[in-house]
Image (cartoon, rainbow, N blue to C red):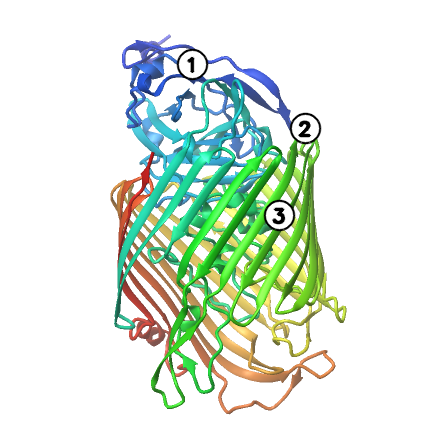
Amino acid sequence: MSVACAWTLFSTVIVHAQTNERRLSISGVAKVGPGKKVLLGEQQGIPRHKITLANFAESQVDLTIDGRVDEPVWASVSHFDNMLVAVPSTGKPGEHPTEVRLIATEKGLYASAIMYQPPATLVRRLANRDQSIDSDGFGLTIDVSGEGLVGYWFILNLGDSLMDGKVLPERKYQIDWDGPWVGRSHIREDGWSAEMFLPWSMMNMPNVDGPRTIGFASSRTVAHSAERYQWPGYPYSSSRFVSVLNQMEVEGVQPRQQIQVIPFASVTADQANDEEELRVGADFTWKPSPKLEVAGTIKPDFGAVEADNVVLNLTAFETFFPEKRLFFLEGSEVFDVMPRSSMSNLSRITNNEDYSSASRRVFSRDFVPSPITLMNSRRIGGTANQVELDPGITPNRGQRDVPTDLGGAAKATGRVGDFRYGVMSAFEDEVEWLGSDALDQPFDIEAVGRDFATTRLVYEDNGKVRRSVGYLGTMVRGPQYDATMHSIDAHYTNSSGNLIADAQLISGERANVNGQGGLFDVMYAPSANTQHTFEFDYMDEDIDFNDMGFLARNNYARARYVLDYSQQELAPRVSNFRMSVVAEQQYNIDPGQLTDSGLYWRTSMVFPGRNTLRTSLGYLPERYEDRDSRGNGAYIVEDRTWVKLALATDGSRVLSYSFTAGGLQEHLGDWTFNGSFGVTFTPVDWLSAKFDVSFKRRRGWLVYQGGRNFGAYDGDEWQPQLDLNWFISATHQIRLALQWAGVRAQENGFYAVPGGDGELVPVPTTRPDHDFTVSLLTAQLRYRWAIAPLTDLFVVYNLGNSLPNQFEASFDDLFSDSFDDPIIESVVVKLRYRFSN
C-alpha cells in the first residue's frame, strides 16, 4: 500500500470517527440511542410503526426554538431514523441519516431533526409562506384524532420559510390553512437541523380516556438530489395516506380550551376613485371543549393584501378561484364532501403528479376539469349577482368585478359521538357600485346584500372498513331570488384501502326552479404503481348551485376514466416515469347531444442532470358546443388534436429554465400554436426573480358576438408575469408581482348557429368592425413584516386595469396604457395581531 493510499484511509477513518463522536452528544450531553418502535403492518409493501412519545411538563422543557437542537432535554429522548425515499418512489432508505425527536407537553408537540449531509450540498432559500420551492426542508403530518379524519401538515424549509395546510382522506391536500406555530432551522458542520413547536390548541383534538393515539408522518426534502424522504415512505401513488399514518402513543395530553382573537385595522387610499377608507374588523375563535368550536368574523376584507392571478377567459365557463380569508379556511374540512371539490386533487389525479422538485416546476392545467362543490366560500362576499339596474344606468368599468363588503359571519363546528357537524351563516353589506346615467352623469348604484347559510351533519364509522353518510345544505337569500340546496353523501373505503367510493345526491331550488344532480366516484389501486379512477356525473337542466357553490355547467351526463401509472426506473437514463391516460364522454340531457369527448395521454420523466420532460397528446372527437352561445343553440365542433411538449431544467441551480411548445385545433379546424419560456434566478438565498411569458398565435378562434353569432378571429396573445422577492430577513419581505394579458384579434369570418343546431353557417357581419383587443393588468408591490404567528404588518400598493377595446393600439401601447387611468389603484396599510391563551 502506498503512503498516499494509507494516509487517505487513515483520514477517512478519522473523519468518520469525528462524525460519529458528534452524533453521540448534544451540547456535551450523552444521547439516548434509537427509539423503540412496533410494526403495525404494511401498506403496499411499506411498513408503518407505532412509538411511545416522551412526555414532559411544559415547565420542565425549557426549549428555545432556534433550530440548533442543543438543549439537554433533546439528548434525553430517543431518536428515530426510519425514512424511505418516497419521491421518486424507490422505497429505499435515504442516503443521508436523519434523527427525529419528538416531545409532548400539555401545551403542544416539540419536534426536532438533525439531518446529516455534506454542507456543500445544502440548498437554502427563502420564500413566501406556503410557496413551494426547491429547498431542503423538514416536515410533519399530524392527525390528532388518530382516526384518519384530517391531517395537519407542517414544513420548515432551510432558511425558515414555512408551509402548512390540511390533508383530507386520503391525499386531498389543502394549502390555504395557516396555523399559529413556530419553526427555525440552523446550518451545522455536518448538515443542518430544525426545531418546531406545534400547539395542540390549533388542532381539533378529541377527548380520550387513558393514553392518546396520534397519527403522524415525518418527511425530509433533499434538494440537491431531488428526493423526498418520508416515514412511512408511501409513494404518491399509494391509495391510502391519512388513514395509515404511523402512530404515537402519549400520556397526559388533553384538549385545551382556546380563546383566540385576531383584530385588524387597515387604511386604504383609493386613488382610482379618489376615496379613503378606514376598516376595522376581527376574527375570533373559542374552543370550550373538543366537541365544539365557535368562530366569528366582523368586517373581514377580501384579501386587499393578496392578489388573484390574471385569467383571460372569453368562454361561457367560469374560472374557479381559491379561498384566502382566514375565517373561511379554519374548520372548513367538515363542509368538504367530495374528492372533486379540490382543484389540486383534480390536477394531481389528471396529471399523475408527485410534485417532484427535480426541475423548475411547470404544471399542466390543460383539460383538467373544474371543481364541483355545494360549498364555495368565495361566493360569500364575492361579486354581486342580484343587482337590478334602472333603465339608462350603466356601471363603471370594473365595478361588476368588485367584491361585496361582508358585514360578518359566524360558524360552529364540532363532534358528538360518531357524528360531526357544522353550521355557518354570513351576511353582506349593501352593494355600492359607481356608475353613470343616460346623460353620462355620475350615479351611485345601490342594492341589498345577500345572506348565506350552510349546515353539515355526517355520521362516520372509522373501523378497518371506513363508512360514512352525511347531509349538506346551503341557503342564499337575495333581493331578487332565493336559492336552497340539499345533498346526501356516502363514502366507503375497504380494509386494504385500495378501493374507495364516494357518492353525492343533490336536489334544490333556485328562483323557484327545482333541479337535481349527482356525483359518483370510484378509485381502485391494484398495486403501488397503478391506480384507476372512475367518475360519473348527472346534472339536470334545472340544477344550479352557483350562488354558494361551484358548478361549471348543468344539463349533462358524463363519464370519465383515469389510469395513473408510475415506474421509477423506466430505462438506464430515465427515472420517475409517470403516465396518465384519460378518457371521457359527456352528453347534454336535452336533446342528448355529445358535448364533450376526449382521449388524453400524458407522460413525465426525469433525465440525467435533473431535466424533466413532459409530453401530452389528445384526440377530441367531433361534438356539439352548447354553452358558448349562451343559450342560443348548439353548433358542431370538428374533431381536433392537442399536443404539448414541456422541458424544465434543474431547479436547484442559480438559473433554471423551462420551455413549452404545443398546438390545439380550434372549433373550425384551424390550428392555434402556443409556447412559453420561463426562468428562475436565485443568485443568493434571500433574493429570487421568476419571469414567465406565454404566447399564442390563434387562427380561426371563435368568440361569441351576441345572439346566435360568432366571429372567427386570427390574433396573437401575450401573457408575461414577474415575481420578484427580496427577503431582508426571514420575517421581512418586499415582493413585486406583475401579470398582464394582452390580445389583438382580427375578424376573418362571421358565423351563426343554425335554427335546428348543426354546423355554423356563414352570415353577414352585424357591424362594420368586429376586431378587438384585450388588456388585463394586475400588479402589486408589498412589504410584509411577520411579527409573530398570524401577526403581520402589510404595506401594499395595488394596481389593476382592464382596457376597453382599442384595436389600433400595438402590444407595446396596450401594455403601457394599462398603467394609465387604472380601475384599481390603492395603497393599503394593514395590521393584524393575534391574541390567544
Q: Residue furthest right?
A: 592
Q: Disc 1 marks which residue? A: 78
How packed is label 3: few (under 14 Cα within 10 Å), some, or many (20 or more)? many
Residue 7 image-quadrant placement? top left
Could you tell me which secondary element the residue under label 3 belongs to? loop
Is the residue 796 above or below the residue 99 in the image?
below
Q: Are marks 3 and 2 in contact (CB under 8 Å)?
A: no
Alpha carbon separation for disc pair 3 and 1: 40 Å
Per the image, the residue denoted by label 2 is 464
Q: The N terminus is located in which quarter? A: top left
Q: Establish if 325 lies above or below 544.
A: above
Mark 1 vs 2, N-terminal side: 1
Q: If the image is split into quadrants, where does the C terminus sit?
A: top left
Q: Residue 668 falls in which quadrant of the image?
A: bottom right
Mark 1 vs 2: CB contact within 8 A:
no
Count numbered badges in the picture.
Answer: 3
Counting from the top left corner in percent of width and height, residue 306 is at 36, 55
Decide if residue 133 is in sight here. no
Local packing at callout 1 (Cα closer than 10 Å; few below 14, some 14-19, many 20+) is some
The residue that appears at 56% across and 47% down in the rendered structure is: 335
Residue 339 seen in the current view: yes
Three-letter amino acid code of the residue under disc 1: Ser
Nearer the observer, disc 1 or disc 2? Answer: 2
Name the residue type under label 3.
Answer: Met
Residue highlighted by disc 3: 338
- Looking at the image, residue 397 sits to the left or right of residue 606; the answer is left
CA separation in Å, label 3 and label 2: 21 Å
Q: Is residue 564 left or right of residue 830?
A: right
At mark 1, the secondary structure is loop
Q: Amino acid at mark 2?
A: Lys
For the residues labelled 1 and 2, the Cα–Cα distance comes to: 31 Å
Secondary structure state at the residue bearing disc 2: loop
